[in-house]
Image: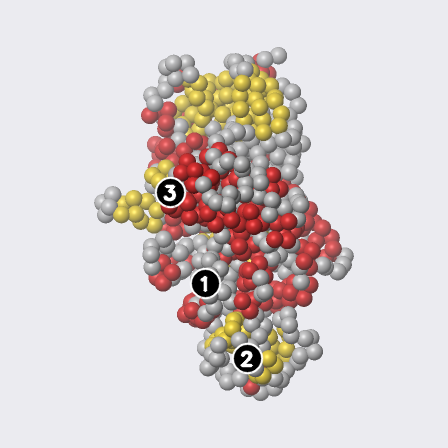
Amino acid sequence: MPLADLIAIEETAAEARARACEEALMTAQTRFEAEQSIARTLGGQVDADGLASFGFWVPELQDLRVPSGDIFLEILRPSEPLDLTRAHQDVRFDRAFVPVIRTENHCFACVRGMRAGTRETIGDFYALVYRDAEDTWHRILDPLAMSLPFGAMAPAELYDVAAMQAQRGDRSYWESLRGETPHKFGPVTNILQIHIPTATSGGTIAALTRQFERLAERVSRNLPMEPADQLFLGYDAVQPLPVEPTTVYEAGPDFWQETDASDTGVTVSLLRPDTTNWGYDNVIAGMATVNPVLLESGRPDELVDLASVLHSFPGKPKKLIFDVVYGHSDNQGLRALNGHFFAGPNMYGQNLDYQNPAVRAILLEMQRRKVDFGADGVRVDGAQDFKYWDSGAQMLRHDDDYLQSMADVEQEVAGTRYRPWFIFEDGRPWPDEDWELSSTYRWVTEHQRDDDVFQWGPLTFAHNTPFLYTYWLSKYWRIRECLSVGAHWIMGTSNHDTLRRGTQVSPELNINTRLGQTRMEILDKAYDNPAAHTLTYAALPGVPMDFLNAMARASWGFIRNQDDRYGVKVVAEEAISLRWQVDEYSYSIPANFTRLKSLGFETRADLARFCTFLPALVDVTEYDLEDIARLLNATDPKLAGPERYTVANLKEVARAWMDDMHDYCNIGHSLGSLDPVQSAYTLALREFRAARPWLRNNYGPKDHFGYIEPLNGRTVFTALRHGPDGEQVYCVIHMEGKETGDLDPLRLKVPGIDGFGWECVLRSPGIGEDYLSGPIVLRDSMALVFTRKTR
């Protein structure tokens, strides 16, 4: 039976939605309030009675003067089994077209008989389509889709969100927070930042969920924890890098490719999405759902499952923080969204038109739907990029009202209304030349209404290189700021940005060679440094955050394999990371760098020589790929790699680099070599911080922070904190440089440490457990923490 005969068009229901849209536009106090009301009805939704409703904001159809009779809802139902876990399949879809009710810039349709997707079943797919004067069909995708098994550039799946929510395993967690007014989440103790594809061998949300399930079981049974387990423990919250759909392959293939199309059916070649990306190259479309690359089953329920396991963790629930990117769109967003979403190009791709009331409302609705997966907090990437053009003043202005609107969104999960905790990454006036000197990192926290809003602090922002000599002393002025205003900052020096920047530093600079004997050891210890961790967890205010790859001493970089036009240029910029993260032994392991080896780079030396030439040629040719290939072929002796370089195989090399580095960055490669002493120490620091929530506060009048003088070739910090219960915490932290010679920490000239009762409670690796007090030689990266009760 044709699909058109299996569904029933509910024209009356669609007309009611169109009238409600018109009513909102006529009676709302502002156009934005009207669009907010309308945005709740947009996208594909199914109610408890099985009525499927669809709404689209389509100003482009007015621009093109498309008549209403040429606009339809397209419904696609697989007529044969569809397996979302297969790499490739050709599937025949039945097709039906449903007329829409149009009101100015919006189109609505309501249908009965459609299949909604669930954890167990695959639903019908849909899009809006229109026919032009030449009888050519064009497709408009749903930016508010709740399931995109084949990515943001393909039709969406109608999904039963209510059924997904009803099955969540953390309902008791949410019900315990229910009150007469919305619950307001506040700051956590600390955060573990995770890139899901490199966090487990499976590389999916489901695999990460299983990891936390296993840990929860071991914790509940009081079983011993190995270093690989300890990496994930002692954290109050987990913050995955963005989990929204990202860009697709610039030069193809598309994950949804159609052939043999008719009015009643179409054959689709389906590819399981398999891109690699660090998460920040989004296209805005699909922000309300989950990147299918991260879904083992292809079902968005996996994200709810992760939230449920974290919220049910034994001892104390772990919070889930979503990292969202609404400050820009990749240029591929132009393919997924109508042009009214955008306000012109920027350094990342496209600015968004926050001043357009409909765009503003839709973006906030995307955010609301996404956070309803069960997030307790939201981190806003690049808040300084939310700007609009003031035509009167002829300048860009920050849209701080929009940032406030983000923090004002009310969520609802399992019947509990709440507002999440918000973190903003805002380094304004970045990217101005003097931003490192002039940024306060406090603009948002000082202008938002909530008193618990946080920002990334100066030690966390991107351009930090703690393995260069004098780094810590040169940042002392920023550390002093942390003491007085850092209570609302995210602290720590290891995150996805700082670790990547570290791999791009020239090894010819003044490197702190005391951190290790090789570059790999130096980089690893710089971002998993006992002294830096002690400073962050025992001395400084704020909320500490650690990046899993840094804590695991795994590799990291700019991971994105979708580029075609600029892929070779990106690799040229990343090539220096080879000198920091890959040695001869690592490259020689048969399972590593298999694609590059198959292209002729049999040894690390082969690849290193190519990586020496490539950046220079990119610069000298102003990125002319034909010239780059010609010059590579002219080297003497001949370069390893392809027999003869061409533009095509240069792009192939770039893709192989990205795919091989992505695999190499998986923390599974480094878990076997973790130092149990280091892992135990960092876990002990996290537990120490958790037991003393007052350490998050700014320094008080009796607190002290300084460094030992004279320097004599080393930077040794001292810190004294006073708790409200009469406890004192005293730290001596060797950040960099020569050893100290014998010093007695309790006899240093630090105001407030006189007297007795001190107990040494934490000793960094390299200091024996038998050390209690007295003279000691401190070397680079060593630290001691003492406590005592004064009443």
Q: Is residue 725 visible?
A: no
Residue, x 58% and y 29% (percent of image)? 271
Amino acid type of the residue that numbered disc 1 sits on in the rendered structure: Leu
Q: Identify the mark nearer the N-term, 1 or 2.
A: 1
Q: Position of residue 671 (x, y in %)?
A: 67, 55
Disc 3, SS: loop
Q: Identify the mark nearer the N-term, 2 or 3.
A: 3
Residue, x 47% and y 39% (percent of image)? 633
Q: Picture quarter containing residue 523?
A: bottom right
Q: 285 or 523: which is nearer to us?
A: 523
Question: Given this view, does label 1 or label 3 mark the residue nearer the observer?
Answer: 3
Q: Residues within 10 Å of mark 2 (few under 14, many from 20)?
A: some
Q: Picture quarter containing residue 521?
A: bottom right
Amino acid type of the residue that numbered disc 3 sits on in the rendered structure: Thr
Q: Position of residue 472 (x, y in %)?
A: 47, 69
Q: Is residue 305 left or right of residue 731?
A: right
Q: Which residue is mark 2?
A: 740
Name the quarter where the C terminus is drawn.
bottom right
Q: Residues within 10 Å of mark 1 (few under 14, many from 20)?
A: few
Q: Which residue is mark 1?
A: 509
Q: Is residue 658 left or right of residue 446?
A: right
Above-or-below relation of 263 to 666: above
Separation (CA) of disc 1 from disc 2: 24 Å
Q: Residue 621 bears which disc, if any? A: 3
Amino acid type of the residue that numbered disc 2 sits on in the rendered structure: Thr
